Image: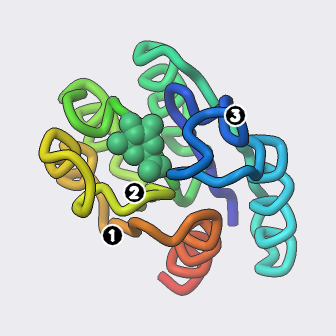
Amino acid sequence: MRVLIINGPNLNMLGIRQPEVYGYDTYSDLVRYCHNQAELLDIDLVCFQSNHEGEIIDKIQDAYKKFDGIIINAGAYTHYSIAIMDALKSVNIPSIEVHLSDIYQRESYRHVSYIKEACIKSIVGLGFEGYKLALETLKNL
Ligand code: DQA
């Protein structure tokens, strides 16, 4: 099974950005954590991060017929990118939305997720563990 994890803008700043919200673990820690979990589940994993909407869309389109699942934390694009939602709907690959923080307990502008509409599941507020749960969910499909 092949899974693609996409992390969007500012997630490369983990460990530095708002540690009171996102913690002190870095993006490299997250990638290592995800690879360890994927190995336990016998999943072939690719991790991708970009601060650019178009690059994220290109990556989703490239995944067509290459990946069996997508896990996406689109960062702030979650709340306004119809284009990323459309890309996910276009490739028709089972996708799961993950957020480190609980977007529904934060500012009201974070309560809307366009990404959710293109996903089979949303996992929020569980930190790194959300990615593990997403990998397990895809594995069990
Ligand atoms: C986030 C939540 C978003 O609202 C925010 O813009 C992020 C991170 C999360 O993982 O909690 O960049 O997606």
Q: Amino acid at mark 1?
A: Lys
Residue that label 1 marks: 121
Circle nearer the N terminus (3, 2): 3
Q: Is residue 60 above or below residue 1?
A: above
Mark carried by residue 50: none
- Quadrant into which the N terminus falls: bottom right
Residue type, numbered disc 2: Glu
Label 2 near ligand 1 (CB < 8 Å): no
Where in the figure is residue 31, as x and y percent of width and height? Answer: 78, 49
Instruction: Please name the residue shown 51% across and 32% down the image.
Output: 8
Badge 3 element: loop
Q: For mark 2, what is the residue?
A: 97
Between discs 3 and 1, the one toward the N terminus:
3
Q: Which residue is mark 3?
A: 16
**Left or right of residue 83: residue 69:** right
Closer to viewer: mark 3 or mark 2: 3
**Point 13% across, 46% down: residue:** 108
Q: Nearer the viewer, residue 124 or 20?
A: 20
| Image location (x, y in percent) of residue 127 | 57, 64
Please state which amino acid type lies under the numbered disc 3: Ile
